[in-house]
């Protein structure tokens, strides 16, 4: 879930036109992503928790239906 949360920040930044300058998704360290400039930081911020929760739930629903 932590990886999908951080990927949500990355996707949110890409959608609103932010430029990703650095990221780390290693599971043994605290994952992070840095955007500069970020024209819509609230979209980038909220995309993390939204996608971080929705993607695992959707994946679990798909797996359960099979």
Image: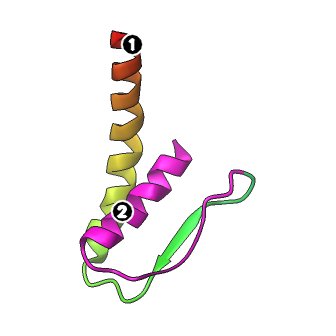
Farthest residue toward the right? 28
Mark 2: give few (<14), some (14-19) or many (20+) Cα within 10 Å.
Answer: some
- Coordinates of residue 40 in the picture (x, y in percent): 25, 78
Asked whether, in this view, residue 28 is left or right of residue 8, the answer is right
**What residue is drawn where x is 34% and y is 20%?**
61
Farthest residue toward the bottom? 37
- Coordinates of residue 7 in the picture (x, y in percent): 45, 57
Q: Where are the magenta residues, as a range?
A: 1-27
Q: Secondary structure at mark 1?
A: helix
- 61 w.r.t. 47: above or below: above
Instruction: Confirm whether the magenta stretch covers residue 23.
Output: yes
| Mark closest to the chain's N terminus, 1 or 2 | 2
Q: Locate the C terminus by quadrant.
A: top left
Image quarter of residue 62: top left
Farthest residue toward the front? 66
Q: How is the image coloured?
A: rainbow
Q: Which mark is residue 37?
A: none
**What residue is drawn where x is 34% and y is 71%?**
13
**What residue is drawn where x is 47% and y is 48%?**
4
Instruction: Confirm whether the magenta stretch covers residue 30.
Output: no
Mark 1: give few (<14), some (14-19) or many (20+) Cα within 10 Å.
Answer: few
Q: Secondary structure at mark 2?
A: helix
Number of numbered discs overlaid on the protein picture:
2
- 5 w.r.t. 58: above or below: below
- 63 w.r.t. 34: above or below: above
Q: Are marks 1 and 2 in contact (CB under 8 Å)?
A: no
**What residue is drawn where x is 27% and y is 79%?**
17
- Coordinates of residue 60 in the picture (x, y in percent): 41, 23
Q: Mark 2 sits on what residue?
A: 11
Distance CA(mark 1)–CA(mark 2)? 26 Å
Q: Mark 1 sits on what residue?
A: 64
């Amino acid at each position: 879930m932590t990886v999908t949360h951080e990927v949500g920040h990355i996707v949110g930044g890409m959608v609103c036109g932010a430029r990703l300058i650095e990221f780390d998704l290693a599971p043994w360290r605290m994952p992070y992503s840095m955007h500069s400039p970020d024209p819509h930081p609230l979209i980038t911020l909220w995309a993390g928790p939204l996608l971080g929760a929705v993607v695992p739930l959707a994946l679990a629903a798909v797996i359960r239906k099979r």
